[in-house]
Amino acid sequence: MFKRAKELKFLPNNRFLRSMNFRFMVFLFLIGTVPLFVFSGAVLSAYKSQAVTRLGNDVSNQCQILATQIGSTGYLDRVGNETLAGELMQMATLNDGRIIIIDQDLQIVEDTYELEKGRTMVAEEVIRCFKGESTGRNISGRFIEMTVPIVAGGEENKTIIGVILASASTDSITARLEELWRATETWLVAIAICVFALSILLSNWLVRPLRHMNQSIGGLVEGSLDGDLDIHDCTETEVISNTFNSLLAKLRLMEESRQEFVSNVSHELKTPLASMKVLADSLLMQEGAPVELYQEFMQDIADEIDRENSIISDLLTLVKTDRKTTELNVTPTDINEFLELILKRLRPIAATNNIELVFESNRSVNAEIDPTRLSLAFSNLVENAVKYNHENGWVRVTLDADHKFFYVKVSDSGIGIPEESIDYIFERFYRVDKSHSREIGGTGLGLAITRSAVVAHRGAIRVQSSLEEGTVFTVRIPIRYIA
């Protein structure tokens, strides 16, 4: 129980951490502060490097001047020049460092610390300086160290008679850097607070269109599908709003189709039952009815049962073809033999109305199809062409193909389809002339089943018709099945 309560307690926080608002806020805060911190660190680092370089140059210049004075005054030969010693001490104090003067015998002549005077100094940088090799500067810990040669003689006979080993403290630079960093930290914290507040405002402003959209969609979910989404805060939300409205229009159409379908199914299933009910009641109300009447009524009841079974079978077929997961049993098939077999089964129906059924093939065609599904589709087309035809009419089935598709054209000399009805003939239970369709029979599902089978094969179906002049259905199917 405690664990569950703890989970519920932290659920809102976790939800906020996963929100786009929080992500925008973090992103904007990082964009505003990280470059600032990096820039501040780079500036302070550049300041330190420049200050150390300047200090090194100052010490080097001072040592060069000092070395020139020592070389020209012969200080190494007669130690005791109070003026020069004072300059050494002043220079060391000014730079908070130490100055050591070494003669040719590597003896320490002068030490501002008075610690090593008179001792021998054998150090690598000193030896290299006596050899005339440039040792440059060395930054070690809190000090800058350098060696400067003391030269005597003219331009042609220069001789290194000693070395100045000088060091200068960088504590003042470090202290100044710490002061600058403290001042920078204060400004950075103040700026970070301002950036954080600004990032909150900007993130709320950026997700505001999404909140409006969520509220609008929530209103549609709670109510009906009558409203539209109208959000024009920015171009993207306007595009999403328009796309959503298009989807909403399709949903409305689907809802209307669903309601009409349920209504049609209910009507189609109830009609045979109502007829059987009337026939049965008529028999029950007539006592001593002749056998012939019983036989006639029972035949009518049997016909209505057959009609009910036909409707249910077509509905089950349509449900199966509508399933997205239904896989086709695709096999290589000789389309010529396939169509001839279909026409062979339908010739007896055509013969009852003296209708000529003709098959024309322009070429031999082999394709990858589901014979069962397409057989049902083409059978519906040919059977409709026979049913809705004139007596002594004709039905022509034509087969042709190119390198990619094969085409089956079913044309007839029948009663035709009105122009205003052509867009609706593939809808379920739609009938052009309900009274005439009732006489002929059928459930109004045949063309819906046909279109579903053709679409499942990645094909297309097209219709052209004129009243009393006939109808032409053209079906296009890929020769190679596209999974």
Image: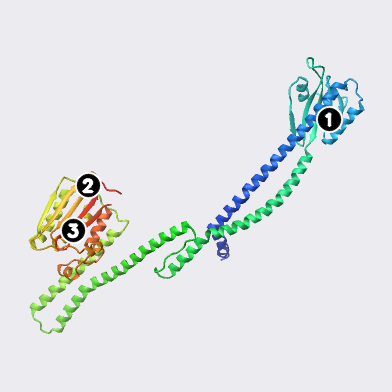
Question: What residue lies at 46% left-to-right and 66% top-to-bottom?
Answer: 216
Q: Type of residue at label 1?
A: Ile
Q: Amino acid at mark 3?
A: Leu
Viewer-proximal residue, 255 or 304? 255
Q: Is residue 283 above or below residue 177?
A: below
Question: Residue 61 location, x and y as percent?
Answer: 79, 29
Q: Are marks 1 and 2 in contact (CB under 8 Å)?
A: no
Instruction: Kindly state the secondary structure of the residue where label 2 is placed.
Output: strand
Pointer 2 residue: 367
Identify the image's colour scheme: rainbow, by chain, secondary structure or one colour. rainbow
Residue where numbered disc 3 is placed:
381
What's the CA distance linking mark 1 and mark 3? Answer: 112 Å
Q: Is residue 453 above or below residue 368?
A: below
How far is mark 1 from mark 2, CA to CA? 101 Å
Residue bearing the label numbered 1: 99
Q: Is residue 163 left or right of residue 20?
A: right
* Of callouts 1 and 3, the N-terminal one: 1
**In which quadrant of the rendered view does residue 415 lie?**
bottom left
N-term mark: 3 or 2: 2
The secondary structure type at the circle numbered 3 is helix
Q: Is residue 110 left or right of residue 367?
A: right
In depth, the one of 209 and 461 nearer the eye is 209
Q: Is residue 49 left or right of residue 238?
A: right
Amino acid marked by disc 2? Ala
Residue at 47%, 59% in the rendered image: 237
Mark 3 in CB contact with mark 2 (< 8 angstroms): no
